[in-house]
Image (cartoon, rainbow, N blue to C red):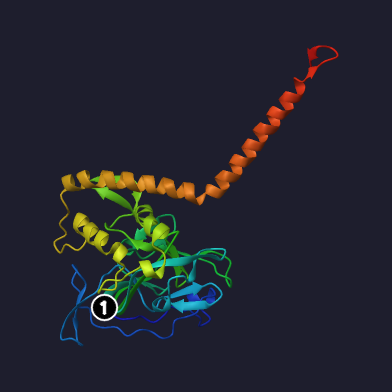
Amino acid sequence: VGFSTPIYNGQGVSQWTAAGYPLVTNTPSFEPECLTKAAYICPDSNSGGVGVGFGICFSGDMEVQVKDKGFYKMKDLRIGDEVLVEGDDVYESIYSLAHADSTQKAQFLQLLPSGLELSENHMVFIENKGAVPARMVQVGDKLVMVGNSKNKTNESVVVEQIKKVIRRGVFAPFTKSGTIVVNGILASTFIAFQPAKYLTIGSVTTPFTYQWLARTFQLPQYWFGRSDDNIKMTEGGMSSWIARPFDFANWLFLLNDNDGQQQNVVVMIIMLPPIIALLIFMSATDVVFTYSSLSIGVALVIGSFIVLHRGSSAKKTIHNPKTKKFN
């Protein structure tokens, strides 16, 4: 397992650099693969014991464009930084760091030639497929490349090779839209708890994507817990807002089960419907909040039209004392 040499175009320039994004030359060191499927466990040479890293993040040396500041490494991002989240220079503030730990080891999938490194459950956008967990990406798939101030044309990058690498440091920023541009590639800020784009219960595929489920679940923190004072981190470097829900989801979907065992379908059928109903309500509430100003504007226009229309009708029915008739 190791970091591969970047793939270059015919002029000796990497495809990523040629598109207007800087090439990461400070390649992080790698270590032999020693992670178990269950919990991503590696021997910790510093402590002589075992270190556990969560495979739900980006590696720290991935690069993100910060508004008016240039390119920052993932490990250097802070709450409040405005990062590129889609084309045409659309930026959003980071309202939370779901996971931020520079000491934990984790396994990442490295998608070449983009150099994007993310955990197998973290979602990335594939052309004509939407957001899917990285473990579903195949050679030949087209990653969505997002234009920046140097490259206004949105293109796609064909995945030519996929490798597994071990990195020390795990980071996962959250944005309102649930997207972030990393190494020039459009990625999700969320993970999928199943190897699927859509939530699956038994053999039934629901219409709910993991991108929608995760973004909607995070709305309460976006609404009420965006200040630094409200965001506390656990000893493992995970946000306290998601630590317990993450553990519950792990249990519900048996995400880290070594034997590939799935949770009892009856349990999922009982527990998921009320959760989904709550998420639908939260999503509807968010739409109302998001478009409240627009709704108020439309209401004022309609109200003004009604008032003017009634005023016009009233003028036509004014009593004329000379003729003793209503005009």
* The C terminus, quarter of image: top right
Where residue 324 sits in the image (x, y, percent)? Answer: 81, 11
- Residue 19 relative to residue 273: left or right: right
Outermost residue, front side: 321
Q: Is residue 169 above or below residue 193?
A: below
Where residue 229 sits in the image (x, y, percent)? Answer: 38, 69
Outermost residue, bottom side: 46
Q: Label 1: state its secondary structure.
A: strand
Q: Residues within 10 Å of mark 1 (few under 14, many from 20)?
A: many
Where residue 97 sits in the image (x, y, percent)? Answer: 37, 69
**In-front residue for pair 89/239:** 239
Outermost residue, top side: 324
The residue to which callout 1 is attached is: 105
Residue 285 in view of the camera? yes
* The N terminus, quarter of image: bottom left
Residue 158 in view of the camera? no
Q: Residue at x 27, y 58 (%)?
A: 193
Residue 41 lies in what quarter of the image?
bottom left
Where residue 282 sits in the image (x, y, percent)? Answer: 38, 48
Residue 251 lies in what quarter of the image?
bottom left
**In-front residue for pair 48/241:** 241
